[in-house]
Amino acid sequence: MADLTDWTMVRSFLAVFRRGSLSGAARSLGLTQPTVGRHVDELETTLGLSLFTRSQAGLIPTEAAQSLVPHAEAMEGAMAALVRNASAGGDMASPRGTVRVTASEVMGTMALPAILADLRFRHPDIVLELVMNNQTDDLLRRTADIAVRMVRPTQDGLVARKMGVVKLHFYAHKRYVERFGLPETLDDLKRFHMIGFDRDDHSARSVAAGKLPITRDLFAFRCDHDVGQMEALRAGLGIGVVQDAIARSNPDLVPVLHNALELSLDCWLAVHEDNKDQPAIRATFDALAQGLSRWTDQAAGAA
């Protein structure tokens, strides 16, 4: 019987699941195909389960395999965190190691680069990784060390600090306004070209917070990526929601119904309590806290 805590078996299983073949998994791991096949066979024997079935399209995961993936990914995240923490040596005067930060697309694109550049000049030995998504469970899965989120983290085991409030309004590019005009009431928005989500309404739920009955049918341009929506707005495709601080840095954006509706999001910074005292993670957390406080202060001033 193989040891179920053997990470090599689980790593090979995940690689086959993601690549769909032994050969693809072997290439991604830098192993030989027989070695990967042996790892999967050992895991199947140990668990007493069939994990893959063969087909012309490759290896197809069974239901049992699919049910194991979240647990295998949690193990993967824990191993990655172990490696990052092991490399985070030094002291607070000269921290070194790898720190993985997760943030939304908008914050990761618009706010964090300048903040992380300041960190680079102060602590050049810290290697930074930035993951942009809207998921909220990165820290618990140990797939990231620090999270910048626009909703308050509620999971146990996290240390969270509120950085401030970000205000948002509707905006449109001046070219769009010149062609189609401006709505006079919120109800008029139905007659204009709205920019919003396609299949993932997470951002819309967070921003609207019950203030608007937002559905997919409202939008004339649909995209599930925040930056894609922002670029569509700047190109003149329609009316969309933007942080005031970002809109003020784009003089061609025109406020829409500014006095009719104001939306807001809280900005939070979170770290797992087990990692908060690692020198590199602590230095990065402190730099993000300072920078995000300035960002939200500027956003409040721009409103």
Image (spheres, rainbow, N blue to C red):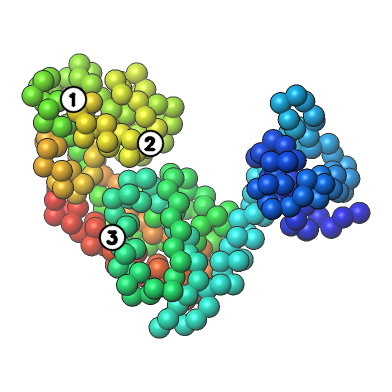
Nearest to N terminus: mark 1 or mark 3: 3
Q: Of tags 1 and 3, which is closer to the observer? A: 3
> As drawn, is 235 to the left or to the right of 95?
left
- Badge 2: how crowded within 10 Å, few (<14), some, or many (20+)? some
**Contact between labelled residues 2 and 3, with CB atoms less than 8 Å apart:** no
> Which of the image's four quarters has the N terminus?
bottom right
Whether residue 160 is visible here, answered yes or no, is yes
In the displayed structure, 86 sits above or below 167; it is: below
Badge 1 marks a residue whose secondary structure is: helix
User: For the point 14% across and 51% down, which residue is it?
Assistant: 302
Across and down, in percent, residue 250 comes to 15, 43
Q: Of tags 1 and 2, which is closer to the observer? A: 2
> What is the C-alpha distance between the residues marked 1 and 2?
24 Å
Nearest to N terminus: mark 3 or mark 2: 3
Label 1 is placed on what type of residue?
Answer: Leu
For the image, the number of numbered tags is 3
> As drawn, is 151 to the left or to the right of 294?
right
Across and down, in percent, residue 197 comes to 37, 29
Badge 3 marks a residue whose secondary structure is: helix
> What is the C-alpha distance between the residues marked 1 and 3?
35 Å
Q: Which residue is mark 2?
A: 225
User: For the point 18% across and 25% down, which residue is it?
Assistant: 186
Q: Nearer the viewer, residue 71 or 98?
A: 98
Label 3 is placed on what type of residue?
Answer: Ala
Nearest to N terminus: mark 1 or mark 2: 1
Q: Nearer the viewer, residue 97 or 187?
A: 97
Q: Which residue is mark 3?
A: 114
Q: Which residue is mark 1?
A: 186
- In the picture, residue 221 is in which quadrant? top left
> As drawn, is 141 to the left or to the right of 110?
right
